[in-house]
Amino acid sequence: MDGPATAEPAFDVQETGETDADALIAGFSEFGLAGLTAVDYLVQQLELTPAGRVTTPDLQTITPFDDGRPRHPVRLFAADGVDVAVLMSELFVPVAAARSFSDALLDWTAAADIGETVVVSGVQMPHAETDHRTYFVATDDYREARLADADVPPMASGFTDGVKASLLARGIDSPLRTCVYATPTHPQAPDAEAALRLVETVDDVYDLGVDTEPMKSFAADVEQHYQDLAARLEQAREEQQPEDRMYM
């Protein structure tokens, strides 16, 4: 049985393969599951293979499975010749664990010589249909390197917390380039349209050549799994921490 979460949970990144990627794209269990759906789709379309996992003994966890086969909830993927690696986290990382999680992850990216860390995220916020696009919050060096010619507007103002905030903060005063791509999401999980917007943005910025046409059928295929995950995520939020927030 899982024990209670500690004030400073410890995380360990365990490599099972090598990567020569320039950037890490991360998606987490959060509102709408758009970011998680987006990175899941990237793994499939880019034919990435397992490259590692992130483990912790200190948080209540989940063990997802398909066809009776269990898997680790926080996994890394990469492939030779692909400029991005992917982190897929089906484990909800509470706000109290964000700094230690980010520290472990960024220690790994530094060792792997990955200079950019990006989070794709759905955001719970009041919005109109015209707001259905992707926005960015990024450090100046990331903006100069990746966004000078990209058709992605900045998020006007506000704040974020949790892992996104911790990663952005680390990038402000260091050579690490960090960015959050965020898009408004709806309560249904997964929000396929929001995930599609995130995939299209990453594909455009990194020129990955991703086929986005199968996105909606892909989301339908994993809908039940992600609905179950969303229910557990909501329970975890109520029991552990307030939900992650970002406002325009």
Image (tube, rainbow, N blue to C red):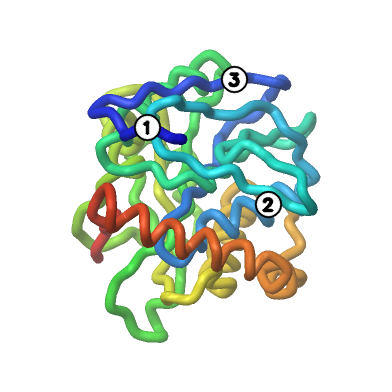
User: Which residue lies under the disc numbered 2?
Assistant: 42
Task: Tell me which label, 1 or 2, sits earlier in the chain.
Answer: 1
Cα separation between marks 3 and 1:
22 Å
- Is 99 on the left-hand or right-hand side of 30? left
The residue singled out by tag 1 in the image is 3
Looking at the image, residue 87 lies above or below residue 7: below
Q: Nearer the viewer, mark 1 or mark 2?
A: 1
Q: Residue furthest left?
A: 158
Q: Earlier in the sequence, mark 3 or mark 1?
A: 1
Can you tell which of label 2 and label 3 is closer to the viewer? 3
Mark positioned earlier in the residue sequence (2 or 3): 3
Q: CA distance from mark 2 to mark 3?
A: 21 Å
Whether residue 213 is visible, yes or no, is yes
- Callout 3: helix, strand or loop? strand
**Residue 85 seen in the current view:** no
Location of the C terminus by quadrant is bottom left
Residue 129 versus residue 232: which sits nearer the camera?
232
Horizontal side of 57 relative to 82 (left or right) equals left
Q: Going 30% across and 61% down the picture, which residue do you hit?
A: 155
Residue 106 image point, x, y percent? 44, 24
Instruction: Point out the residue furthest to the front here.
Output: 1
Residue highlighted by disc 3 = 14
Q: Residues within 10 Å of mark 3 (few under 14, many from 20)?
A: some
Q: Amino acid type of disc 1?
A: Gly
Q: Secondary structure at mark 2?
A: helix
Expressed as whole percent of the image width and height from the top left, the position of residue 216 reads: 68, 74
Residue 220 % position (x, y): 69, 73
In three-dimensional space, the C-alpha distance between marks 1 and 2, rounded to whole angstroms, equals: 34 Å
Residue extending farthest to the top is 111
Picture quarter containing residue 181? bottom left
Q: Tag 2: Cα neighbours inside 10 Å, few (<14), some, or many (≥20)?
A: many
